[in-house]
Amino acid sequence: MANSMLRRVRVVAALAWKAHPVATAGSVVLGVLGGVAPVATAWLTKLVLDALALGEGTAALVPLGAGLAVAGLAVIVLPHVSAYAQAQLRRALRLLIYDRLFRAVNTHPGLSRFENPSFHDTLRLAYESSHNAPDRLVAGALAIGQALITLSGFVVTLFAVNPLMVAVILVAALPSVRIQLLLSRERAEVMWEITPAMRRQVFYGDLLTKPEAAKEVRLFGLGDHLRARMLGEVRGINRAERDVDRRTLRSQGVMALLGSVVAAGGLLWAVVSAASGQLTVGDVTVFVAAVAGVQAALTTIVTQWADAHNALLMFGHYTAVVEAEPDLPVPAAPTPLPALSGRIELRDVWFRYSDEHPWILRGVDLVIPSGRTVALVGVNGAGKSTLVKLLCRLYDPVRGQITWDGVDLREASPADLRARIGAVFQDYMDYDLTAAENIALGDLTAAGDLERVHDSARQAGVHETLTALPRGYDTMLSRIFGDRDETGVALSGGQWQRLALARALMRVRQDLLILDEPSSGLDAEAEHEVHTSLRRHRGDRTSVLISHRLGTVRDADLIVVLSDGRIIERGTHDELMAAGGEYARLFTLQASGYETGGAGGGVDGGVGGGAPEAPEDILRTATPSTRSAGR
């Protein structure tokens, strides 16, 4: 444990020096001067008083008085200059630490860490500790160093007057050191324990304030229920923090009382000694200043050390994130990924999210030929979206392999692979940015190419909608952000889905296009337009299409039916209908909705082009922000 804490101290020191070496060096120098100034002031005060008592002339008093004035000025001015230097260091250090934290987050190429609640707790504490723990450590180290210099000077002073008093004060301080360290560790443990409650508090607060949830909260009368839950989390957090505060108050009260008794005893001894002629007036003055200075320095050291100890414990979450290995192995010398000309192949692919979870994919064998469209069909939970995650290498198979023209995806660079993929996910994002920025995120290398942005929007059928906005493509698509003169615009769910599609279409050179429910939130006419546009855009590109509306996949070159993580059927639409298996059953059941006015209501999705929607289809057309609130 001690080695771990020492290593974290070295990490913070190195970060401080790298962030702002001038401010770091200046803070250290100012800390040394700040530690010397109180001791110099006390000694100069003693010398002035003794000189006055002995009737010394101005020749002796003027230099002493001038020195005392300079020391007093230093005591007043140095803290302000030091605060300025530390503020410069704090800002530079925070920028560097944020950069390293989120650079480390971006080194995780997969999703496993981001779908792990424990990692979210660690990441939250890492973010919070990166905000203030380094500041506390640097400020604490400087304060401790300054206090140690002051303490050393006053200890020498006390030793010259009364050696026994030094021992008494130091021994009285030892229990306080021990108690403060225990309390700092307890505070760090409490912070870890209440982090899930803090996340839930933020979650409930977001539901009460974000516009995406406002409709349902008001329609279903959820406001008081969610408020009660949020307040329940806050009360639990408060109880845990209050218990620690009470123990801190009791411990510090006892230590303060002990310190007061020691100081009172020392003062009484000094007064009696002066009355008997053993001490001069100057001796009494410097003794009183030394006792107060030693106790103040010890209090500063103990308090700052306890706070620094707590900050070091919290900073451990930051180092855990920054030093964590990538969640997916990335080869040091990745194999170059060729432009897809042959096929993507899944060989005996098994996958589950952890050893405690069931298998999602069970021995999947699949060939996706270059230039062909493969559709994945199956009820919810069949493994379709998980298979897409593996194709994007957001996870690796537990068993088996996936190859791209013979290259195992684990041997290639994830960035290289993803640069060759365009995708619209079922749980697409809506960004609080302008319309142009929302689309340009699909290919940042073409962010300044407005014609490319407009062309992608046209293909997705959203160009006219965006040009009609108050500021066209420069309109902020957010009710949260925007300038003071004009609030942003909120799009409908279907419009957001088209925007997400336009973002995917920005990648004009991709080898693989993945479309996971690309039209689930659209009306019949819009769905027809989008799929017609997508057919033109796909051309001879390799495509993987997922849709519960089987009418939208019937023209695919290969339709693969998944059930319980296995491929149970494959073939063209006509072949599968002739086989009379699961695909034919689902297609017939959905199509019957046209003839009976709703017979297909119990199946995932309709045929497309206006089929009656099943309840699950209605759920899938919810706005992205609402859906992500429940993920």
Image: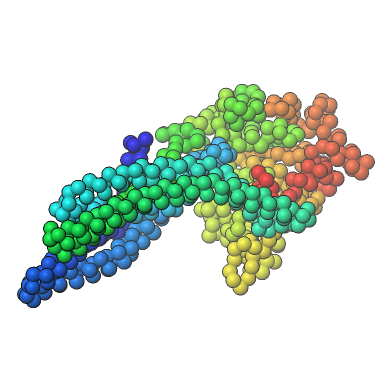
**Quadrant where the image shows the N terminus:** top left
With respect to residue 606, does 32 lie above or below? Answer: below
Q: Nearer the viewer, residue 23 or 276?
A: 276
Does any portion of residue 385 appear in the rendered image? Answer: yes
How many numbered discs, if any? 0
Is residue 33 found left or right of 239 in the rendered image? left
With respect to residue 101, does 269 lie above or below? Answer: below
Q: Quadrant of residue 72?
A: bottom left
Q: Position of residue 370 (x, y in %)?
A: 62, 35
Q: Residue at x 62, y 62 (%)?
A: 480
Q: Residue at x 15, y 72 (%)?
A: 65
**Quadrant where the image shows the C terminus:** top right
Is residue 193 found left or right of 601 in the rendered image? left
Q: Position of residue 58 (x, y in %)?
A: 8, 76
With respect to residue 53, does 409 lie above or below? Answer: above
Colour mode? rainbow
Q: Residue at x 61, y 27 (%)?
A: 356
Q: Residue at x 69, y 66 (%)?
A: 468
User: Which residue sits furthest right?
Assistant: 596
With respect to residue 364, does 160 lie above or below? Answer: below
Q: Quadrant of residue 556?
A: top right
Q: Nearer the viewer, residue 566 or 41?
A: 41
Is residue 570 found left or right of 607 in the rendered image? left
Q: Nearer the viewer, residue 286 or 14?
A: 286
